[in-house]
Amino acid sequence: MWLERRIIREAGLPYLSASPVTMLSAIAARKAKSATITEKASPSENEAADVPAFRPSKSSRSSKRKVSTRGAEEPRVGAPKRQKPLSASKIDEGKRGKKAVAIVVAGGLRESEGDDDSFDSGLSTDDDEVPVDPLPPARSRGWSPSAPVVDSGSDGEEPEANLSTLPTRSPTIFQSSASTDTIRLTSDEISGLGLKAAHGNAVALALSVGQRFCLLGAYTVVVVHGSLEACGAIFTPSTVPRLHRVFAPKCSHLPAFECISASSTSRSSPCPVPPRLQSVCAKFDAVVIVQELLLGVEGLERVFGTFNGMFRESHQEKTNGEVEDIGLLGVQMVTQQTRSLQPLTLLPSWNAALSSIDPPPSPSSSSAAGVFLVKGPKKTGKSAFAVTLLNKLLSQYTRVAFLECDIGQSEFGPAGMVSLHVLDKPVLGPAFTHPSLPFRGHFIGSTSPRSSPSHYLASVDSLFQTYRTEVQTPGLEPLADNRIFEYIPLVVNTMGWVKGLGASLLGSIEEIVQPTHVFELQSSTPFPSSTSRASPPTTQHHFLQPFVSSLAYTAADQRSLSILSYFHSVFADRNGTGDASADFSQTTPDLWDTSLPLCARFPFEVDCSTAFERVVLVGCGSEDVVPEHIHTVLNGALVALVDCEEGALDSHPDLASQTPCKSPFSVPYIQGGPPPSPSASRCLGLALIRAISPDTQKMHILTPLPPSSLAKCRVLVKGEVELPIWGVLDFREQEEGVLAGFEKQKMPYLQWGKSEGVGVEKRRVRRNLMRRGQM
């Protein structure tokens, strides 16, 4: 009752008797007050009035209840009430109310919802403009013992970057402009260009300056006239045709090629051009040859059912005219940008940062080999920019080194490894399309360095020292172009864990590599290490706008696809070729063999008693495995094949007083032993132990490594990374109840149907149940 009297008194209305029939309610008084203020402030019906914000009256009475800051004209938040038919006066008044505001953040469209009780959301006109204030930063709760522990080390548990306070930009719409200028080549014309007609059909695309094209599928491109740019790389003609592999599935952003203004040297094609294309080269600024690429990578759709159809157009896309056929098997021209067909368009801040990288004044100067570090939170396009930066540098240098420090989302191999790669060709495709054998690598055994931060930093430091001593000045012969060959620059891709221990590790990596350029993907809150550790005065800092992707694939799916792609790859054995430059070239798969699942392939049979010197377990809980159970742990596990120097296994001080125990299958194992030292070992690759026979001391191993590399392995290291369930299943069509030639119910390690009991369901961590101050 006292609240109703107070509201009526503030509205300036007479107070009626306390009769239930005549007494005004609080809601009626609030509406009457709003109507009174509106009549006093508006001199005419046609002139809009500015309603002042509601300010609570001062009172000496202290109350524990928070004072509401909601305006007097705003309705209460609650369930929507059924409204009566509006009169003409109320409709005119509703037109002056608030309307929905569209907010565009880094290419994504989002609508701010109005109040539930508002009846004017559909009656606002386009002439009304409502100023939008920048969103305030999210409040963070102070530390207390009752605060939930948010473990940001594991994948998917760290909160995403808050992009609400960043500058907005309009979404970029891709429009293809080269689909009409397509020329199909004959077999003789393909051979005349220095290509192999047996690799597939080919077409020529003619473009003018500013025109772009984007293709869906796997193909190769060869520029015979003019210059093209895609994903930061620049493609020009050469005397010997340079084929560039392009992988453009729907699960990633598609590379888009654009014709740029060509210089006088690139306009005159140095390679032989068929007579039918010479007239085309005279009319257009660029001519590019597109050929089919049949390497079997499309077979991964059968292996991993989640990515089914990623290299093929759907019936709806073909019916709607979103893709067009250009006469190549498995390659379609993208004509419209849709949710599943998203060409990669670089942000303005990315282009500005890439343009600021100038080549050194002299190739022999000490600043010729720069160190470029990329950092940023999760899901901000950090890896995409690192690859774009790599492609940009390859237009100035013959080779570029890449230090992968993101063990959860590795760009050139399976998860769980820090690795050093040396590349000589641009990267045009997602991570699973270019698994590579590293120049040097170390196995961490997990998707996060949370459980072994010291081993993680020691591995990164060892790889950087390898780069300084063996890679930075390779001493190779120059190529037939003007690119720098005396030095090899380094690109460092860091992980997306930027809080707590992750921020400390990120600062330590910066101290190790001493970068000359730092590219930081912006977030709503600065990195904790940005103010605690000072960078060298010569370091150039570039702040970039994050790239928000709307692709419907999680990081765990991409990581599983990379592991399966690695085990279905076929690498050529380049050891013993006698070519010194082979060590400084990227070793990618020649093809993907998806004809048989992993459970039906012929493995390597290894004698455990003579092949390996040590078995090491790393990760949480590994110290509890006793020697009697080591064969059970290794059966069906992913292990790292490690090459160690002589005596490196016994040089650790913790192993001086321990003697390796013989397990039931005669492999030395020390319970709780440390991993091999990064300074005296290297990881060659991963392998799958498909079966172990303790009686015969035999082990069946599956690995994509060449036999020459497998012979160097002397140590097995098992971590927390496991084979995805898709890799265990048989994707071939078989009769009901049969898996890999055996009965399903008798297949080990696989259970069909739902189990019952406590603890059999997948553990789900709920991070959305937080207090108001933590949101």
Image (cartoon, rainbow, N blue to C red):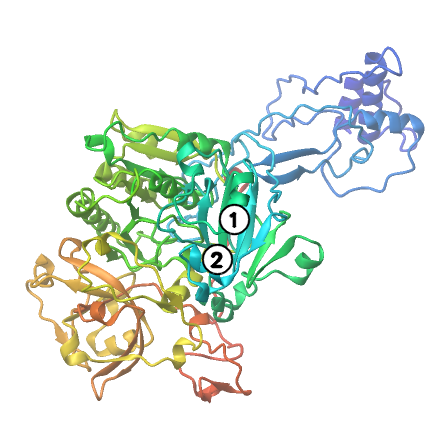
Badge 1 is on which residue? Answer: 277
Residue name at image x 44 percent, y 72 percent: 594
- Residue 287, percent across and down? 50, 45
Q: Is residue 581 above or below residue 516?
A: below
Few, some or many C-alpha atoms within 10 Å of disc 2 (few <14, some 14-19, many ≥20)?
A: some
Tell which of 591 and 112 is nearer to you: 591
Q: Is residue 210 above or below residue 48?
A: below
Badge 2 is on which residue? Answer: 189
Residue name at image x 86 percent, y 28 percent: 24
Q: Is residue 672 visible?
A: yes
- Residue 13, percent across and down? 85, 18
Residue name at image x 45 percent, y 64 percent: 197
Horizontal arrangement in the rendering, residue 628 relative to residue 26 (left or right): left
Label 2: element kind: helix
Quadrant showing the N terminus? top right
Few, some or many C-alpha atoms within 10 Å of disc 1 (few <14, some 14-19, many ≥20)?
A: some
Amino acid at the residue labelled 2: Glu
Rendering quarter of residue 723: bottom left
Between the residue at mark 1 and the residue at mark 2, the CA separation in whole angstroms equals 9 Å
Task: For the residues labelled 1 and 2, say whether their Cβ atoms are less than 8 Å apart.
Answer: yes
